[in-house]
Image: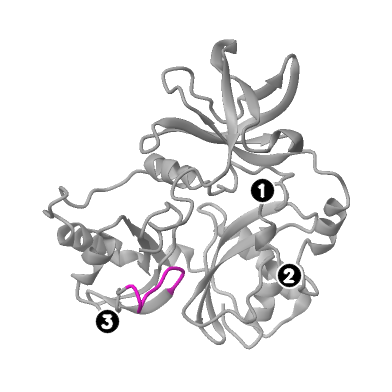
């Protein structure tokens, strides 16, 4: 996304603020529809004053790109948009040794903590490949996303795996999407499309922090004001179950109060590091306080008891992300 009006365009299509975003940093990006419901999220990277690199949810790139083209056909701002999704690949390198591994590879990027802080973004060359590197924290650990031309992905993968092999901890290992999703759940990170539905608002998701209310306009702002004028009917809350030997709730398992349905589970899993079941669920606001007791109806009508807890479940101070 390039042009003199690029920051203004982002200010209009996303709920957060980007006009004063510093070059070399990234910010969370939450997109709402005109009706004020969450439809996508990602990050906005400011590469230069008029040059931005924007990510979306895994399957949302084409839809978001079409939405952006639709709005700019009306606003006619001085900005050009290019969809690089099919031209780029992304590799995520995460864990307490990730900085050491990347620092051992020939590159013009300084991966040191001071030179490349959390929520930073850098353009450069890694092993002869032009890359954009994001220091993001979706899995809750020190980590980097390396975005490169897609035809270089396999070579970069092999190089990183080779650089991380054979250290004292047993070496670098591939990680699957299920493990990644458990890690993000331990951090209480919302997964758009799983923890949201067609009627989810930012306030229900506890994401008021991602709304720049002082902006004169963004898509969905007027509708969000209308939603705010009405009492909340549900909020997304974290819960835990200490006993891991029983039933594990799954997505769309129901919360019940006697014979009355009061909510539903969106995500749940056994946390290996916490040794308990953690999850997210839509609950009535009066049941969202930490310590509140929830009853979840699992498969075969089995009932399990959970308790609402504050999120994130793991490393609430983000010490591991900011190593």
* Position of residue 318 measured from the top left corner of the image (x, y, whole percent): 45, 57
Could you tell me what secondary structure mostly forms the magenta stretch? loop
| Total labels drawn | 3
The answer to whether residue 66 is left or right of residue 270 is: right
Colour pattern:
one colour
Asked whether the beta carbons under mark 1 and mark 3 sit within 8 Å of each other, the answer is: no
Q: Residues within 10 Å of mark 3 (few under 14, many from 20)?
A: few
Of callouts 1 and 3, which one flags the residue occurring earlier in the amino acid sequence? 3
Give the quadrant of the C terminus.
Answer: bottom left
- The residue under label 3 is 108
Q: Is residue 288 magenta?
A: no
**Separation of marks 1 and 3 at Cα, in angstroms:** 40 Å
* Position of residue 205 measured from the top left corner of the image (x, y, whole percent): 66, 48
Question: With respect to residue 274, does 161 lie above or below?
Answer: below
Of callouts 2 and 1, which one flags the residue occurring earlier in the amino acid sequence? 2
The answer to whether residue 195 is left or right of residue 313 is: right
Question: With respect to residue 311, does 5 lie above or below?
Answer: below
Identify the residue at horizontal 37%, vertical 75% (top origin). Answer: 116
Q: Residues within 10 Å of mark 1 (few under 14, many from 20)?
A: some
Disc 1 versus disc 3: nearer the observer: 1
Rendered image quadrant of residue 297: top right
Instruction: Give the extent of the magenta segment.
Output: 113-120
SS for dot 2? helix
Identify the residue at horizontal 49%, vertical 18% (top origin). Answer: 247
Asked whether the beta carbons under mark 2 and mark 1 sit within 8 Å of each other, the answer is: no
- The residue under label 2 is 71
**Separation of marks 3 and 2 at Cα, in angstroms:** 38 Å
Asked whether the beta carbons under mark 3 and mark 2 sit within 8 Å of each other, the answer is: no
Label disc, if present, on residue 205 of the rendered structure: 1
Nearer to me, 12 or 140: 140
């Amino acid at each position: 996304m390039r042009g003199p009006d690029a920051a203004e365009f982002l200010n209009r299509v996303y709920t957060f603020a980007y006009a004063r975003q510093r070059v070399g940093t990234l910010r969370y990006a939450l997109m709402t529809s005109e009706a004020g419901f969450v439809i996508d999220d990602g990050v906005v990277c400011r590469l230069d004053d008029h040059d931005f690199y924007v990510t979306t949810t895994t399957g949302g790139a084409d839809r978001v790109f079409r939405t952006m083209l639709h709005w700019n056909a009306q606003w006619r701002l001085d900005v050009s948009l290019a969809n690089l999704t099919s031209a780029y690949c992304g590799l995520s390198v995460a864990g307490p040794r990730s900085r050491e591994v990347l620092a051992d590879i020939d590159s013009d990027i300084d991966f040191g903590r001071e030179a490349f802080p959390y929520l930073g973004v850098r353009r450069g060359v890694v092993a002869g490949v032009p890359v954009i590197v994001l220091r993001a924290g979706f899995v809750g650990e020190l980590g980097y996303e390396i975005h490169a031309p897609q035809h270089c992905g396999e070579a970069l993968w092999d190089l990183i795996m080779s650089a991380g092999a054979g250290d004292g901890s047993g070496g670098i290992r591939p990680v699957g999407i299920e493990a990644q999703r458990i890690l993000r759940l331990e951090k209480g990170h919302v997964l758009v499309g799983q923890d949201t539905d067609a009627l989810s608002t930012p306030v229900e998701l506890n994401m008021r922090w991602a709304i720049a209310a002082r902006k004169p306009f963004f898509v969905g702002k007027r509708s969000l004001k209308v939603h705010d004028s009405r009492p909340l009917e549900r909020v997304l809350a974290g819960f835990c179950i200490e006993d891991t030997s029983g039933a594990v709730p799954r997505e769309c398992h129901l919360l019940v109060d006697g014979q009355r349905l009061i909510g539903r589970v969106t995500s749940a899993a056994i946390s290996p590091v916490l040794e308990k079941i953690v999850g997210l669920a839509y609950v009535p606001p009066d049941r969202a306080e930490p310590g509140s007791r929830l009853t979840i109806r699992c498969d075969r009508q089995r009932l399990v008891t959970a308790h609402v807890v504050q999120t994130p479940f793991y490393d609430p101070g983000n010490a591991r992300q900011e190593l």
